[in-house]
Image (spheres, rainbow, N blue to C red):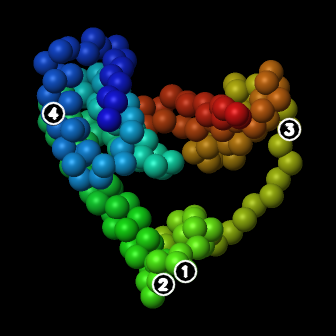
């Protein structure tokens, strides 16, 4: 498991790095398919925020916590990730067992296993509504104004510069975030 640290408006100290590595290494024992971990440490208004993004078997799991102390933030985010990984692992294992149940070794069909992995769990929420709309080319500033006008937390638009579909969203701190997908 590779752990990559970033600091926003703060330098990542070796003490914090060692503490975070010791906490996050426990997650690998919980679910051994974790390949890469990104840890972002930041300080905003005397609140220490830790964002952790795990990449595990094609799935991305993310958690964020903030507190007055950086070490308690890493403790909180690790506990949240443990819960999320346990839930993911339970679904992952139950899907494998259900798909293989009652089959003899020569009867295992790998296509059915992959199809069941891609399927929805009974516990997951259902899509209740689908919206279709035309997206016009605009710059991110114009998209943020449109988002404010309609009163949503996000807005999908076609970036006039790149001609790609982007998403602008309102962050908890009141600023905006922009999602630009990378097409391989």
Q: CA distance from mark 3 to mark 4?
A: 48 Å
Name the mark nearer the viewer: 1 or 3.
Answer: 1
Say which residue label 1 marks.
Answer: 107
Q: Are marks 2 and 3 in contact (CB under 8 Å)?
A: no
Foreground residue among 64 and 86: 86
Residue 169 visible in the displayed image: yes
Say which residue label 2 marks.
Answer: 103
Say which residue label 4 marks.
Answer: 22
Foreground residue among 4 and 62: 4
Q: Are marks 3 and 4 in contact (CB under 8 Å)?
A: no
Q: Earlier in the sequence, mark 1 or mark 4?
A: 4
Q: Are marks 2 and 1 in contact (CB under 8 Å)?
A: yes
Foreground residue among 82 and 75: 82
Name the mark nearer the viewer: 4 or 2.
Answer: 2
User: Which residue lies at the image location 82% right of the left edge and 53% below the top edge?
Assistant: 133
Figure quadrant of residue 69: top left
Looking at the rendering, in which quadrant would you find the C terminus?
Answer: top right
Q: CA distance from mark 2 to mark 3?
A: 51 Å
As helix, strand or loop, the secondary structure at mark 1 comes to helix
Name the mark nearer the viewer: 1 or 4.
Answer: 1
């Amino acid at each position: 498991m590779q752990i990559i640290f970033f600091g926003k408006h703060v330098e990542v100290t070796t003490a914090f790095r060692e503490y975070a590595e010791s906490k996050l290494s426990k997650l690998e024992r919980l679910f051994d398919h974790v390949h890469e971990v990104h840890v972002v440490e930041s300080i905003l208004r005397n609140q220490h925020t830790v964002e952790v993004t795990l990449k595990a078997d094609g799935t991305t799991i993310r958690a964020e916590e903030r507190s007055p102390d950086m070490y308690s933030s890493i403790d909180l985010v690790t506990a949240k990730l443990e819960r999320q990984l346990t839930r993911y692992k339970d679904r992952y294992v139950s899907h494998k067992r259900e798909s293989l149940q009652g089959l003899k070794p020569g009867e295992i069909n790998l296509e059915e296993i992959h199809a069941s992995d891609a399927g929805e769990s009974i516990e997951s929420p259902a899509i209740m509504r689908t919206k279709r709309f035309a997206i016009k080319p605009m710059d991110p500033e114009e998209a943020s104004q449109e988002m404010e006008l309609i009163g949503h937390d996000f807005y999908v638009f076609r970036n006039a510069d790149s001609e790609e579909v982007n998403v602008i969203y309102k962050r908890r701190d009141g600023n905006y975030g922009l999602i630009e997908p990378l097409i391989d």
